[in-house]
Image: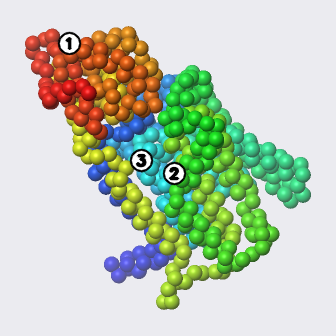
Amino acid sequence: MNDITPSAGRWFRRHIHLALLIGLFVAEAIVFYAHIARDVAPFYPPSFDQLSYYLSTYDLLGAFHAKGSRAFVDELLQPGNPTGTTFVLQGTLLSLIGGANRTIFLSVNLLYFLGLQFVLFTVIRSRIGRIDFAWTGIALLLSSATVIQAAGGIYDYRIDFSAMCLYGIWTCLIVWCGAFRHTGRSLIVALAGILLVYSRFFTVIYIGVVLGALLAINFYMLLRASTPERNAAKRRVINILLSGGLIAAVCLPRLYLSRDAIYGYYMIGHVLGEEKYIRAHELGLYSLAGHLIYYPKSIVVRHVGLLAWLIAGALAGWSLWRDRVAVSEMLGRLRPFGHEFIALGVAVLIPVAALTANVSKSPVVGGIVTVPILLAMVLFGAALWPRGAVIKLTRARAISVSAVAMAIALAAFAIRGTSSKDVAPRADLERITLLARSIATYAAENNLDRLSMSTDRVVDYQNVGTTRLASIELLHRHLDVDGLLGHGAYGIFATSREDALRLLAESDVIVLTDPVTDRSHPYPMNTKIKEYWGELWQWTNENRVLLFSTEIFGIPYRVFARSPSDKEHRLGRASTDDAQPR
């Protein structure tokens, strides 16, 4: 031990920042898994998107057990995937190590987040040459609001958070390679870009236009700059073409394979169809001004967040006050990072412009530009920081600003990361689980592997997805559920009376609420159904048997099912308190 201990002590002193970074990762993992165990895994996953990703992961895991590793190849080359092809695959591969459950699936987000922090820390330390700015970058990332957002954050199982991390890694690597000044590093940028595109297909537009803009800027410099700058511009042009060509060679064939699915999802759903207006109205967007300012406002408030702005503003404000340099000198200090600022600016503006041009808006997708904004803040601070200045917070010893920023950011991450503020009331969450379980149990007791279901209200917590998920996780049983009224083509769009009655007649299970409560939701189906809801209620009571009833968020829910034709099947009733419609 006497021989080992000094050696270990020397290693720790030499690699103290690596040890601290590992300790930070452990603390983040503790916060992450504690919140999942208490507020995430036991209840339904909010939003339709992450519900579909959970189900796709369970389906791929089932396909793997049936077909072996060929199922993974099929998933990677699946032409029906319109958005991406690696996220579900990664969740499934993790489940082979840790088990098939939502905690393990969500670990994909944690791994991406840890990877992003490591790359951000390493790039800042390498490019600026100061460890305190590397820690400041981590502090800004931890304090950003997008990490803990209920929708699109680290606890949300969909591609948006991992895409944000990968896009952040890609932009960090661009800074690391000197905005394509180094050839070898430019190839690593290409590898990150390939993983990003395979994770989220739409990002090929961001990458392509960003590289195109940087190529045009360097072409201009190649023609107009002096000889030294011209040589650097020539090197950057070659490296941009090399990196972009590698990304195109690997990604374009995969995108071509999914061309029909991509066209249907984006062109029909987001450009040519009527759904884009419904999505915009869902967010209260009706005017051109509202559309133009939506993403800038969302990025500033919802994704970067107040705390990150305050930390960055305090550091920048102090440095400007400390030196009080002229504007010309300030611009001179920024010049060494000129190409990096241009690259980060383009990496922010291109996604914002592309998203703004889309009528269908989302509170989630703007987070993709969070990391390049934070990285630009760090570079700006490093350029303006007073030469040789140290802030002494106590007389006894100097405490670095980065340590204070990290303490604030880590406390904020822990508090927000374990908060239940954005979680629905526990009683309602438990009733949602009971409702889904009652339908899954009905199918199990009647030996049904497939059933059809209709509902009179479009909500994310009651649909075929929540029923399937309950059957898998609570009953450990695969169940196919066909969605009729309230799903698919008869989902958010208004459904006629004739179609609604026809769909009810085809349904094994019918979920009815009431015609009045909370029907002002922007989905046309929720408002249209008020015109004939009484007929649906009458037909269902005459032709189906009450299976379960409860109240969720102040809305009555009644589950009706077919009476079993086989006498050996018994209809299990979870509740018989049939409340009358309002």
Query: Which residue is painted at 70% across and 40% down in the image?
Result: 209
Query: Which residue is tagged 1?
Result: 542
Label whose residue precedes the other's in the sequence (3 or 1): 3
Q: Amino acid at mark 1?
A: Glu
Label 2 sits on a secondary structure element that is: helix
Label whose residue precedes the other's in the sequence (1 or 2): 2
Label 3 sits on a secondary structure element that is: loop
Q: Is residue 210 visible?
A: yes
Q: Amino acid at mark 2?
A: Arg
- 438 or 167, which lies in front? 438
Query: Which residue is painted at 36% across and 33% down in the image?
Result: 518
**Image-quadrant location for residue 373:** bottom right
Query: Which residue is painted at 33% across and 28% down in the image?
Result: 516
Nearer the observer, disc 1 or disc 2? 1
- The x, y position of residue 354, in whole percent, is 64, 38
Label 3, label 2: how many angstroms apart (C-alpha)? 11 Å
Query: Which residue is tagged 3?
Result: 150
Q: Is residue 417 above or below residue 531?
A: below
Query: Which residue is tagged 2?
Result: 302
Q: Is residue 448 above or below residue 416?
A: above
Quadrant (top left/top right/bottom left/bottom right) for the N terminus: bottom left
Label whose residue precedes the other's in the sequence (3 or 2): 3
Nearer the observer, disc 3 or disc 1? 1
Label 1, label 2: how many angstroms apart (C-alpha)? 49 Å
Label 1 sits on a secondary structure element that is: helix
- The x, y position of residue 134, in whole percent, is 57, 66
Label 3, label 1: how many angstroms apart (C-alpha)? 41 Å
